[in-house]
Amino acid sequence: MKKLFALLCLFLTLFSAPSFAENQTQPFRAGSLSDILKTRQGKPFILMFWSLDCASCMKDLDALAASMKKHPNLDLVMVSTDEAEFAGEVSDMLAKHKLKQVESWIFSDSNAQRLRYEIDSSWYGELPRSYFYDAGHNRLPVSGAITTEHIDAWVAAVKP
């Protein structure tokens, strides 16, 4: 009976745990960019930095959602520069903009400047900030708003 109970508890734990598809925002710390790059070796993707209090970012979220609908295989990684305590609000905002399914991170280091420098030594924190990575992980940084046309052009350029 104890074994049956233990198996039942294990089963419930495994199948009731939230999945990544439910948009579990992960802590972005020193080294996180390397982790993101390693999991995407040889694959193009978009990395976008945004914040809850950035009005231009909200327009980008809409453009990205439209592009995700048009290009279902688009690999998009969202990183919020908000403090880690806002992870719930970040998840809610992504869901509101129909980006619930994307990989989501949030700054989790008290030294945001150090994180920005690790990402890009020429980035001083302006938002939104997007990086368009090709399959060789050459990247094109874009500060400011992006459009669906910009994303469409990039998708066409990186298609094999």
Image (cartoon, helix red, strand yellow):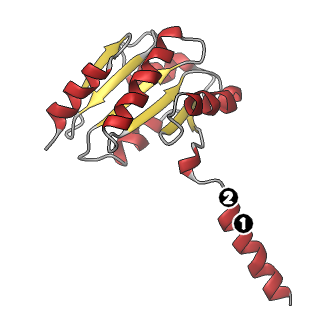
Three-letter residue code for mark 2: Ala
Please tell me whether residue 128 is drawn above or below residue 48 in the rendered image: above
The reply to whether callout 1 and callout 2 are in contact (CB within 8 Å) is: yes
Secondary structure category for the residue under label 1: helix
Q: CA distance from mark 1 to mark 2?
A: 6 Å
SS for callout 2 = loop
Residue at the right extreme, as displayed? 1
Mark 1 Cα within 10 Å, few/some/many (few <14, many 20+)? few
Specify the quadrant that holds the C terminus. top left
At horizontal 78% and vertical 73% (from top left) the residue drawn is: 9
Q: Nearer the viewer, residue 7 or 97?
A: 97
**What residue is shown with label 2?**
17
**Residue 52 image point, x, y percent:** 59, 18
What residue is at 29 percent from the left and 27 percent from the top? 132
* Quadrant of image for the N terminus: bottom right
- Label drawn at residue 153: none
Q: How many marks?
A: 2
Q: Which residue is mark 1?
A: 13
Image location of residue 51, percent across then percent down: 55, 18
Residue sitting at x 17%, y 33%: 156
The percent position of residue 48, horizontal first and vertical second, equals: 42, 26
Between 105 and 96, the one nearer to me in the picture: 96
Q: Is residue 138 visible?
A: no
Give residue 10's position: percent from left, percent from top.
72, 73
**Residue drawn at 61 percent across, 33 percent down:** 91
